[in-house]
Structures are given as structure tokens and as C-alpha cells.
Amino acid sequence: MVARLVPGLALAAAGGSAALLTHAVVPALSPTLVAILLGLLLASRGGVASASRAGLRVASRQVLRVGVALLGLQVVLPELLALGWPVLVVVAGVVVGGIAGTLALARPLGVPPERALLVACGFSICGAAAVAAVDGVRRSKDEDVATVVSLVVVWGSVAMLALPLGAMALGLPPTAAGAWSGASVHEVGQVVVAGGLIGGVALQVAVAIKLGRVLMLAPVLAAISYRSRRAAEVRPRLVPVFLVGFVACGLVRDVLPGPVLDVASAVQEAALAMAMFALGCSLEPAVLRRTGRPLLALAGCATVLVALLGLPAALLTA
């Protein structure tokens, strides 16, 4: 049984390592985004052997859950509380309003509820990690997960570049521009790039606010799990184990020594890179070509909606 998983896990490890190496050479490139692109490239060239699929599936699910759980170690509660309650309320409003608004827009656009939920959570919380975390609760189709993660890459990159330009056009100071980026851009890595483009203290503020959105992953997943449990004949866990791990990591972060946090951070990045590469490998080129206009439109609308909801964070910190 274990031997059957080795080829796929080894392939995912190689792809994740390549993404981490790329990030080390070009820090502006997020390893998770590079990993999904490498996986897509390999899949488009027909380079995924059938013997690797079992291991890749484990990487895209079980390994991913390890990465999501360890993501809790990035949440620095004192820095979040230092932003002030009004900003934290806006952060919660971005997540709740972004999810509710995206789900509402999905109906007239004709996007199926399962895909709409993946878009809503991924674009409102923390990008690819949130999409995959919802998959861990809902057990969505691999095709849907990989498609939405690909849209996170595209639309998140647009927001990453557009928001600093928009902040400049509005004449926002660096702190406010960073707050807007942190409240609106999809991926943590994309937020880092956006904050770096603005400069000054923008990066620190952007990352702190973004991690506030990451913290919202726990209650959102708990709510989704609860609803799935009520609707399903075979009930899933009320609270997934990886969600318990996420919360626990956030609680113990401040008491762990620096070397332990450094090792855990490296493991978290490696696990997410492996998982994103595996997800990229699961998406066939034909699926991308079949991605309909309604889903593309919903992703674009969700990006604009989250940006509008995040603007008050900039005004509060201006």
C-alpha cells in the first residue's frame, strides 16, 4: 500500500522543492503559486504517469492538511490586536461579506453551488490554502479545486498589481495602501508582493491584516463542516482534525522558541508547495479550456467585491 504512494509523493516533493528553490532565487514569487503553475505545466505536457496519481492524491489532501494546520503559526495575535477593533471588524466583514456576496452572485451567473463556495472562500480568506481547506471539509471534485486554485493565481495576480496602482491614484499613504492590499488580495504571497511594491510600512500592515483574514479560516470551516454534517447522510467530523491543529498552532505560537517556529514554517511551506503542485497535476488542459465564462466572471466579480469591502480598512488606517 505504502509503496504504491511513493512515486506520486516523490513527484510532489520534487515539484514542491523546485517551487521553493524558485522562491529562494526570486523572493517575489510565492512558492505555492509557482508550485501550482509547475503542476499545470507538467499536466499539460502529459507528464503525469498513472502510477503517480495515488501519491499525488495523498499529497493534495493529507499533506495539504498538515500545511493548513501549521498555517496557524503565522497568526501573531498581538500584531492583529494592535490594529484596533474597527480594523478587525472590517477584516471580518471582508470575509463574511465576500463569501455571502460571491454566493449571491453565483446564482444569476449560473455557477454551481460547490464551485461557488470554493471561489467565495478562496477569494475572501486566503487563496489556494482556503480553497483546499474547504475541499478537506466538503470533499469537492479535484477538477473543481484545481480550477478554482488556478483562478486564484490569475485574479490574485491582477489584484496584486492593480491595488497598489489604485492606492497611488487615490493618494493613499503607505499605511492605508498596505491595509487595503492586506484586506483585499487573495494569497499571502501576493499580499507580500503588493506590500513590497508600495514600500515603507505598507508591507508590515498588509501582512498583519492578511493574517487576520487567515484567522477567519477557522470559524468559516467550522460553519461549513456543521452545515455539511447536517445535510449529509454519512456525517463528516463536526470539527476536522486539521482545523483543530490550525487553532492549536495559533494558540501556542507565542510560547514556542524561535528555532521551533523556523522549522515549523519550513515544513508548512514545503507541505503547501507539495500539495499545490499535486493539485496542478490533477488538472487536465481540457478542463482549463472548458472553464466557462460564468465561473471566470464570478471570480472577477469576487475580486472586485473583496477589494471594495477592504477599502474601509485603508480609510481607517489613513
Image: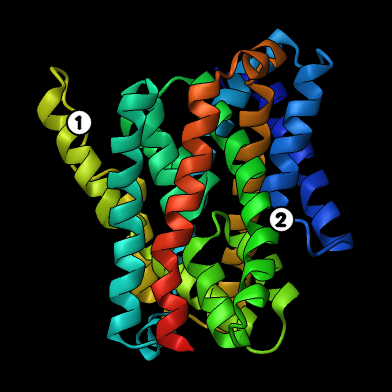
Quarter of image, res 168:
bottom right
Residue 257: image location, x then y, percent: 52, 83
Tell me, yes or no, if residue 68 can be seen here: no
Looking at this rendering, what residue extends furthest in the right direction?
A: 25
Type of amino acid under label 1: Ser
Q: Residue at x 34, y 35 (%)?
A: 105
Q: Are marks 2 and 1 in contact (CB under 8 Å)?
A: no
Which residue in the protein does label 1 denote?
A: 228
- In the image, is 20 to the left or to the right of 60? right
Q: Residue at x 58, y 42 (%)?
A: 152
Q: Residue at x 49, y 51 (%)?
A: 304
Residue 241: image location, x then y, percent: 31, 46
- The colour scheme applied to this rendered structure is rainbow
- In the image, is 254 to the left or to the right of 108? right
Which residue in the protein does label 2 denote?
A: 30
Quarter of image, res 76:
bottom left
**For residue 295, above or below residue 253:** above
